[in-house]
Protein backbone atom coordinates (compact mmCIF):
# COMPACT_ATOMS: atom_id res chain seq x y z
CA UNK A 1 0.00 0.00 0.00
CA UNK A 2 1.42 3.43 -0.94
CA UNK A 3 2.55 5.63 1.93
CA UNK A 4 -0.12 8.22 1.07
CA UNK A 5 -2.86 5.61 1.48
CA UNK A 6 -1.37 4.40 4.76
CA UNK A 7 -1.31 7.92 6.17
CA UNK A 8 -4.88 8.58 4.98
CA UNK A 9 -6.18 5.35 6.54
CA UNK A 10 -4.37 6.13 9.79
CA UNK A 11 -5.83 9.64 9.86
CA UNK A 12 -9.35 8.33 9.27
CA UNK A 13 -8.97 5.68 11.96
CA UNK A 14 -7.63 8.28 14.42
CA UNK A 15 -10.58 10.56 13.69
CA UNK A 16 -13.08 7.74 14.20
CA UNK A 17 -11.49 6.55 17.44
CA UNK A 18 -11.50 10.07 18.84
CA UNK A 19 -15.18 10.35 17.94
CA UNK A 20 -15.90 6.90 19.37
CA UNK A 21 -14.94 8.14 22.84
CA UNK A 22 -18.52 9.47 22.92
CA UNK A 23 -19.63 5.89 23.46
CA UNK A 24 -18.03 5.97 26.91
CA UNK A 25 -20.48 8.66 28.06
CA UNK A 26 -17.69 10.62 29.71
CA UNK A 27 -18.13 14.43 29.79
CA UNK A 28 -14.51 14.78 28.66
CA UNK A 29 -15.36 12.68 25.59
CA UNK A 30 -17.74 15.35 24.34
CA UNK A 31 -14.89 17.87 24.34
CA UNK A 32 -12.48 15.40 22.74
CA UNK A 33 -15.00 14.60 19.99
CA UNK A 34 -14.78 18.20 18.83
CA UNK A 35 -11.30 17.35 17.50
CA UNK A 36 -12.51 14.39 15.43
CA UNK A 37 -12.21 16.41 12.22
CA UNK A 38 -8.61 17.48 12.89
CA UNK A 39 -6.91 14.31 11.48
CA UNK A 40 -9.18 14.45 8.42
CA UNK A 41 -8.38 18.08 7.70
CA UNK A 42 -4.67 17.49 8.25
CA UNK A 43 -4.64 14.57 5.81
CA UNK A 44 -6.53 16.53 3.17
CA UNK A 45 -4.59 19.78 3.45
CA UNK A 46 -1.34 17.78 3.32
CA UNK A 47 -2.02 15.00 0.82
CA UNK A 48 -4.97 16.27 -1.22
CA UNK A 49 -8.62 15.51 -1.85
CA UNK A 50 -8.08 11.87 -2.80
CA UNK A 51 -6.35 11.12 0.48
CA UNK A 52 -9.06 13.08 2.28
CA UNK A 53 -11.75 10.91 0.68
CA UNK A 54 -9.93 7.74 1.75
CA UNK A 55 -9.51 9.08 5.30
CA UNK A 56 -13.21 9.96 5.48
CA UNK A 57 -14.24 6.52 4.19
CA UNK A 58 -12.00 4.87 6.76
CA UNK A 59 -13.52 6.98 9.51
CA UNK A 60 -17.03 5.99 8.46
CA UNK A 61 -16.14 2.28 8.43
CA UNK A 62 -14.46 2.41 11.85
CA UNK A 63 -17.37 4.30 13.43
CA UNK A 64 -19.77 1.75 11.94
CA UNK A 65 -17.76 -1.10 13.46
CA UNK A 66 -17.55 0.59 16.86
CA UNK A 67 -20.98 2.19 17.18
CA UNK A 68 -23.31 0.87 14.49
CA UNK A 69 -25.19 2.39 11.58
CA UNK A 70 -26.74 5.40 13.33
CA UNK A 71 -23.45 6.35 14.99
CA UNK A 72 -21.62 6.12 11.66
CA UNK A 73 -24.31 8.18 9.94
CA UNK A 74 -23.99 10.98 12.51
CA UNK A 75 -20.20 10.89 12.11
CA UNK A 76 -20.57 11.12 8.34
CA UNK A 77 -22.94 14.09 8.44
CA UNK A 78 -21.21 15.99 11.24
CA UNK A 79 -17.55 15.25 10.49
CA UNK A 80 -16.49 13.34 7.39
CA UNK A 81 -18.67 14.88 4.69
CA UNK A 82 -18.27 18.55 5.75
CA UNK A 83 -14.48 18.20 6.13
CA UNK A 84 -14.28 16.61 2.67
CA UNK A 85 -16.30 19.44 1.10
CA UNK A 86 -14.25 22.16 2.80
CA UNK A 87 -10.90 20.59 1.86
CA UNK A 88 -12.03 20.08 -1.72
CA UNK A 89 -12.98 23.76 -1.99
CA UNK A 90 -9.91 24.99 -0.12
CA UNK A 91 -7.57 23.25 -2.55
CA UNK A 92 -9.16 24.80 -5.64
CA UNK A 93 -6.92 27.24 -7.49
CA UNK A 94 -6.55 28.97 -10.83
CA UNK A 95 -3.73 30.77 -12.62
CA UNK A 96 -3.78 34.55 -12.30
CA UNK A 97 -1.28 37.16 -13.49
CA UNK A 98 1.49 34.60 -13.79
CA UNK A 99 0.82 33.24 -10.32
CA UNK A 100 -1.81 31.20 -8.50
CA UNK A 101 -5.07 32.36 -6.96
CA UNK A 102 -6.42 30.05 -4.27
CA UNK A 103 -10.04 29.65 -3.25
CA UNK A 104 -10.73 32.61 -0.94
CA UNK A 105 -11.78 32.28 2.73
CA UNK A 106 -15.07 34.16 2.30
CA UNK A 107 -16.63 31.51 0.05
CA UNK A 108 -15.24 28.82 2.38
CA UNK A 109 -17.19 30.40 5.22
CA UNK A 110 -20.25 30.54 2.97
CA UNK A 111 -19.81 26.83 2.23
CA UNK A 112 -19.97 26.10 5.97
CA UNK A 113 -23.07 28.27 6.25
CA UNK A 114 -24.69 26.41 3.36
CA UNK A 115 -23.88 23.02 4.91
CA UNK A 116 -25.24 24.06 8.32
CA UNK A 117 -28.41 25.42 6.70
CA UNK A 118 -28.90 22.30 4.58
CA UNK A 119 -28.59 19.94 7.56
CA UNK A 120 -30.95 22.12 9.62
CA UNK A 121 -33.50 22.11 6.79
CA UNK A 122 -33.21 18.33 6.34
CA UNK A 123 -33.72 17.67 10.05
CA UNK A 124 -36.66 20.11 10.19
CA UNK A 125 -38.31 18.34 7.26
CA UNK A 126 -37.63 14.91 8.80
CA UNK A 127 -39.51 15.94 11.97
CA UNK A 128 -42.39 17.59 10.11
CA UNK A 129 -44.72 14.75 11.13
CA UNK A 130 -43.88 15.05 14.82
CA UNK A 131 -46.25 16.94 17.11
CA UNK A 132 -44.99 20.51 17.01
CA UNK A 133 -42.40 19.65 14.37
CA UNK A 134 -38.70 19.84 15.17
CA UNK A 135 -39.34 22.45 17.84
CA UNK A 136 -41.78 20.13 19.60
CA UNK A 137 -39.36 17.19 19.35
CA UNK A 138 -36.56 19.31 20.83
CA UNK A 139 -38.82 20.46 23.66
CA UNK A 140 -39.68 16.86 24.51
CA UNK A 141 -36.02 15.86 24.37
CA UNK A 142 -34.96 18.75 26.64
CA UNK A 143 -37.69 17.98 29.20
CA UNK A 144 -36.73 14.31 29.36
CA UNK A 145 -33.02 15.15 29.62
CA UNK A 146 -33.60 17.61 32.46
CA UNK A 147 -35.75 15.11 34.34
CA UNK A 148 -33.08 12.42 34.08
CA UNK A 149 -30.39 14.81 35.27
CA UNK A 150 -32.38 16.19 38.21
CA UNK A 151 -34.21 13.03 39.19
CA UNK A 152 -37.84 12.57 40.19
CA UNK A 153 -39.24 14.87 42.85
CA UNK A 154 -36.51 17.48 42.41
CA UNK A 155 -37.59 21.08 43.06
CA UNK A 156 -38.34 23.27 40.09
CA UNK A 157 -39.74 20.55 37.83
CA UNK A 158 -43.07 22.36 37.66
CA UNK A 159 -41.48 25.06 35.51
CA UNK A 160 -39.55 22.60 33.36
CA UNK A 161 -41.94 22.77 30.42
CA UNK A 162 -41.60 26.56 30.30
CA UNK A 163 -37.80 26.42 30.35
CA UNK A 164 -37.72 23.64 27.78
CA UNK A 165 -39.98 25.61 25.45
CA UNK A 166 -37.72 28.66 25.65
CA UNK A 167 -34.56 26.64 25.02
CA UNK A 168 -36.12 24.68 22.15
CA UNK A 169 -36.86 27.90 20.27
CA UNK A 170 -33.14 28.43 19.53
CA UNK A 171 -31.59 25.06 20.32
CA UNK A 172 -31.22 23.91 16.70
CA UNK A 173 -29.47 27.13 15.72
CA UNK A 174 -27.09 26.92 18.69
CA UNK A 175 -26.17 23.33 17.77
CA UNK A 176 -25.58 24.40 14.15
CA UNK A 177 -23.33 27.25 15.29
CA UNK A 178 -21.41 24.87 17.56
CA UNK A 179 -20.82 22.57 14.60
CA UNK A 180 -19.85 25.47 12.30
CA UNK A 181 -17.29 26.79 14.80
CA UNK A 182 -15.97 23.28 15.39
CA UNK A 183 -15.35 22.78 11.67
CA UNK A 184 -13.92 26.27 11.26
CA UNK A 185 -11.45 25.86 14.15
CA UNK A 186 -10.41 22.33 13.14
CA UNK A 187 -9.64 23.55 9.64
CA UNK A 188 -7.53 26.42 11.00
CA UNK A 189 -5.65 24.12 13.40
CA UNK A 190 -4.98 21.53 10.69
CA UNK A 191 -3.66 24.17 8.28
CA UNK A 192 -1.41 25.56 11.02
CA UNK A 193 -0.03 22.06 11.72
CA UNK A 194 0.76 21.19 8.10
CA UNK A 195 2.15 24.68 7.50
CA UNK A 196 4.42 24.37 10.54
CA UNK A 197 5.59 21.02 9.20
CA UNK A 198 6.21 22.55 5.78
CA UNK A 199 3.87 20.16 3.94
CA UNK A 200 0.91 22.49 3.28
CA UNK A 201 -0.48 22.46 -0.25
CA UNK A 202 -1.84 26.02 -0.17
CA UNK A 203 -0.86 29.13 1.77
CA UNK A 204 -2.87 29.82 4.88
CA UNK A 205 -5.99 31.92 4.24
CA UNK A 206 -6.01 35.25 6.03
CA UNK A 207 -8.78 36.27 8.42
CA UNK A 208 -8.55 39.78 7.00
CA UNK A 209 -9.50 38.41 3.56
CA UNK A 210 -12.90 37.09 4.66
CA UNK A 211 -15.47 38.92 2.53
CA UNK A 212 -19.18 38.15 2.42
CA UNK A 213 -21.48 39.02 -0.50
CA UNK A 214 -24.20 41.64 -0.26
CA UNK A 215 -26.94 39.16 -1.13
CA UNK A 216 -26.38 37.49 2.25
CA UNK A 217 -27.53 40.74 3.88
CA UNK A 218 -30.86 40.59 2.04
CA UNK A 219 -31.26 36.94 3.05
CA UNK A 220 -30.62 37.99 6.65
CA UNK A 221 -33.28 40.68 6.35
CA UNK A 222 -35.83 38.10 5.20
CA UNK A 223 -35.15 35.87 8.20
CA UNK A 224 -35.16 38.90 10.53
CA UNK A 225 -38.69 39.71 9.40
CA UNK A 226 -39.62 36.03 9.62
CA UNK A 227 -38.87 36.04 13.35
CA UNK A 228 -42.18 37.88 13.80
CA UNK A 229 -44.06 34.88 12.39
CA UNK A 230 -45.64 32.16 14.48
CA UNK A 231 -45.25 28.44 13.99
CA UNK A 232 -42.77 26.79 11.65
CA UNK A 233 -41.82 29.97 9.78
CA UNK A 234 -40.87 31.76 12.97
CA UNK A 235 -38.93 28.75 14.26
CA UNK A 236 -36.89 28.47 11.06
CA UNK A 237 -36.22 32.22 10.93
CA UNK A 238 -35.07 32.42 14.55
CA UNK A 239 -32.60 29.59 14.17
CA UNK A 240 -31.31 30.77 10.81
CA UNK A 241 -30.63 34.17 12.37
CA UNK A 242 -28.58 32.47 15.11
CA UNK A 243 -26.45 30.84 12.39
CA UNK A 244 -26.15 34.10 10.43
CA UNK A 245 -25.03 36.02 13.53
CA UNK A 246 -22.16 33.54 13.93
CA UNK A 247 -21.20 33.86 10.26
CA UNK A 248 -21.20 37.65 10.41
CA UNK A 249 -19.26 37.60 13.69
CA UNK A 250 -16.48 35.60 11.98
CA UNK A 251 -16.51 38.13 9.14
CA UNK A 252 -16.37 40.89 11.78
CA UNK A 253 -13.23 39.29 13.20
CA UNK A 254 -11.81 39.56 9.71
CA UNK A 255 -12.52 43.30 9.79
CA UNK A 256 -10.71 43.60 13.13
CA UNK A 257 -7.72 41.66 11.79
CA UNK A 258 -7.60 43.99 8.80
CA UNK A 259 -7.77 47.16 10.92
CA UNK A 260 -4.93 46.18 13.28
CA UNK A 261 -2.52 44.54 10.84
CA UNK A 262 0.81 46.27 10.57
CA UNK A 263 0.46 47.83 14.03
CA UNK A 264 3.09 47.07 16.66
CA UNK A 265 0.47 46.25 19.27
CA UNK A 266 -1.72 44.12 16.97
CA UNK A 267 -1.11 40.98 19.06
CA UNK A 268 -2.30 42.72 22.21
CA UNK A 269 -5.33 44.15 20.42
CA UNK A 270 -6.36 40.81 18.94
CA UNK A 271 -5.78 39.09 22.27
CA UNK A 272 -8.09 41.62 23.94
CA UNK A 273 -10.81 41.04 21.33
CA UNK A 274 -10.68 37.24 21.57
CA UNK A 275 -10.43 37.41 25.36
CA UNK A 276 -13.51 39.64 25.55
CA UNK A 277 -15.39 37.15 23.37
CA UNK A 278 -14.55 34.26 25.69
CA UNK A 279 -15.13 36.11 28.96
CA UNK A 280 -18.15 38.29 28.17
CA UNK A 281 -19.78 36.84 25.05
CA UNK A 282 -21.72 39.98 24.12
CA UNK A 283 -18.92 41.40 21.86
CA UNK A 284 -20.09 38.81 19.32
CA UNK A 285 -22.96 41.20 18.56
CA UNK A 286 -20.53 44.04 17.82
CA UNK A 287 -18.49 41.77 15.55
CA UNK A 288 -21.64 40.60 13.77
CA UNK A 289 -22.60 44.23 13.09
CA UNK A 290 -19.09 44.88 11.71
CA UNK A 291 -19.41 41.87 9.41
CA UNK A 292 -22.89 42.94 8.35
CA UNK A 293 -21.97 46.49 7.33
CA UNK A 294 -18.55 45.70 5.80
CA UNK A 295 -19.86 44.81 2.30
CA UNK A 296 -21.48 48.26 2.13
CA UNK A 297 -19.15 50.45 4.24
CA UNK A 298 -15.83 48.89 3.11
CA UNK A 299 -14.31 49.44 6.55
CA UNK A 300 -11.22 47.41 5.70
CA UNK A 301 -10.13 50.03 3.16
CA UNK A 302 -9.82 52.55 6.00
CA UNK A 303 -7.27 50.44 7.87
CA UNK A 304 -3.53 49.99 7.30
CA UNK A 305 -2.55 48.72 3.87
CA UNK A 306 0.55 47.16 2.44
CA UNK A 307 1.47 45.39 5.68
CA UNK A 308 1.58 41.62 6.30
CA UNK A 309 -1.87 40.31 7.30
CA UNK A 310 -2.39 37.98 10.26
CA UNK A 311 -3.08 34.27 9.74
Image (spheres, grey):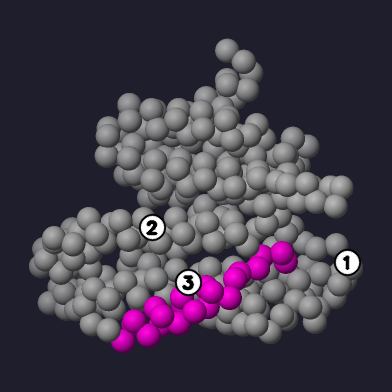
Q: Report the residue marked by disc 3.
A: 244
Residue at 68 percent across and 84 percent down: it is 297
Near mark 2 (Cα within 10 A), the count class, few <14, some 14-19 or many ≥20, is few
Sequence-first disc among 1 and 3: 3
Q: Position of residue 12 (x, y in %)?
A: 50, 31
Magenta-drawn stretch contains 226:
yes
Of badges 3 and 2, the one in the foreground is 2
Which residue is denoted by mark 2 in the rendering?
118
Is 299 placed above or below 253 here? below
Residue 276 versus residue 212: which sits nearer the camera?
A: 212
Q: How many marks?
A: 3
- Which quadrant, please, contains the C terminus? bottom right
* Element carrying mark 3: helix
Q: Are marks 1 and 3 in contact (CB under 8 Å)?
A: no
Q: Which residues are magenta?
A: 208-228
Q: Position of residue 22 (x, y in %)?
A: 36, 42
What is the x, y in percent for residue 185?
58, 54
Question: Residue at point 40% right, 61% down?
Answer: 117
Find out whether residue 135 is within the magenta segment: no
Mark yes or no: residue 58 visible.
yes
As drawn, is 288 to the left or to the right of 24? Answer: right
Mark 1 vs mark 2: give the one in front.
2
Q: CA distance from mark 3 to mark 2?
A: 13 Å
61, 146: nearer the viewer: 61
Amino acid sequence: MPIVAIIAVAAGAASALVYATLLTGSPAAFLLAYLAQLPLFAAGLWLGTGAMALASLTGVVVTFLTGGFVFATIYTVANAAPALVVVRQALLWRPKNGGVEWYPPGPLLLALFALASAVFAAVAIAFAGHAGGLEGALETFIVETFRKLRGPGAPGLADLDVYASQIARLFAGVVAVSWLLMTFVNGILAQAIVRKAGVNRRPSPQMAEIDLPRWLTWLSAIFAVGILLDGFGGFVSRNMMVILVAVYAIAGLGVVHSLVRGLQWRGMALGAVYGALVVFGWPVVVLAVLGLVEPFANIKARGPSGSPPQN
